[in-house]
């Protein structure tokens, strides 16, 4: 079973500075263990490329082989952590931090493209009404932006954390909370520089 969180160090940032690796890791986190072949098919990769990226993720300590599944021909991989955390303001390596954030932005934009074409048109009314696709322009200082980031992180954490007994009971039953679905939360906060306005 995956640990809850990992704070990304420089080595992990370097591994995840590739949008495909980030996409593979996110897929394993959201959908659970998978084989190289399944992941290659899903992402329209050849098996060699998928295998290469998975080996890099494993070397970075982000995924591991699921030895309880598969055979020598079909190796299964699983995520080692549910969530990666990274705070650019505390990163010791600015270049690696920026490369990782670029990969996150590219992976998120691909997710939004897929959602726009495949999910929004068929989303049930109840879920469509509860969903949010917001874009706002605010005038903030770096300190205000940082304060907003931390406040929103607190709100997200309150919805993410469940009581340990409730989690164990849900996992033991193999069921989820009634009416609950996995929800992707994407939040981008960055300044519009003069040339972008």
Image (cartoon, grey):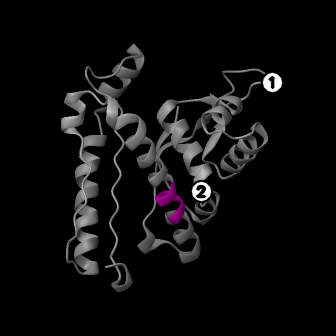
Disc 1 secondary structure class:
loop
Give the percent coordinates (x, y) of residue 58: 68, 45
Q: Position of residue 6 (x, y in %)?
A: 49, 51
- Horizontal placement of 14 versus 82: left or right? right
Mark 2 vs mark 1, CA separation in Å = 26 Å
* 103 is within the stretch colored magenta: yes
Q: Position of residue 19 (x, y in %)?
A: 58, 55
- Residue at 61 percent of width and 50 percent of height: 20
- Does residue 27 appear to the left or right of 192 in the view shown? right
The numbered disc on residue 23 is none
Instruction: Find disc 1 in the rendering and name its residue.
Output: 73
State the residue at coordinates (28%, 26%).
180
Q: Secondary structure at mark 2?
A: loop
Span colored in magenta: 102-106
Quarter of the figure with residue 129: top left
> Around disc 1, counting alpha carbons within 10 Å, would you say few (fewer than 14), some (14 to 19), or many (20 or more)?
few
Residue 9 location (% of width, % of height): 56, 62
- Which of disc 1 and disc 2 is earlier in sequence? 2
Q: Quick one: quadrant of the C terminus?
A: bottom left
Residue at 58%, 75% in the rendered image: 95
Front residue (pair 170, 141): 141
Q: Are marks 2 and 1 in contact (CB under 8 Å)?
A: no
At label 2, counting other C-alpha atoms closer than 10 Å, the crowd grade (few under 14, some 14-19, many 20 or more) is many
Q: Vertically, is 131 above or below 93?
A: above
> Taken as a whole, is the magenta stretch helix, strand or loop?
helix
Query: Farthest residue in the top direction?
Result: 173
Q: Which residue is mark 2?
A: 16
Q: Is residue 138 magenta?
A: no
């Amino acid at each position: 079973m995956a640990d809850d969180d990992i704070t990304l160090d420089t080595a992990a940032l370097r591994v995840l500075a590739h949008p495909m690796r980030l996409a593979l890791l996110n897929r394993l986190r959201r959908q659970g263990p998978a084989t190289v072949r399944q992941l290659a098919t899903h992402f329209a990769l050849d098996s060699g490329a998928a295998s290469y990226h998975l080996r890099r993720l494993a070397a970075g300590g982000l995924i591991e082989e699921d030895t309880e599944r598969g055979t020598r021909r079909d190796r299964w991989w699983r995520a080692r952590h549910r969530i990666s955390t990274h705070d650019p303001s505390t990163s010791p390596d600015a270049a690696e931090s920026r490369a990782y954030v670029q990969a996150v932005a590219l992976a998120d934009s691909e997710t939004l493209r897929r959602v726009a074409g495949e999910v929004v048109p068929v989303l049930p009314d109840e879920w469509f009404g509860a969903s949010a696709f917001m874009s706002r322009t605010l005038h903030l200082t770096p300190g205000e932006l940082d304060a907003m980031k931390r406040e929103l992180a607190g709100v997200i954490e309150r919805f993410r954390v469940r009581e340990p007994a409730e989690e164990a009971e849900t996992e033991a039953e193999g069921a989820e909370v009634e009416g609950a679905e996995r929800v992707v939360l994407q939040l981008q906060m960055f300044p519009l520089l003069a040339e972008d306005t």
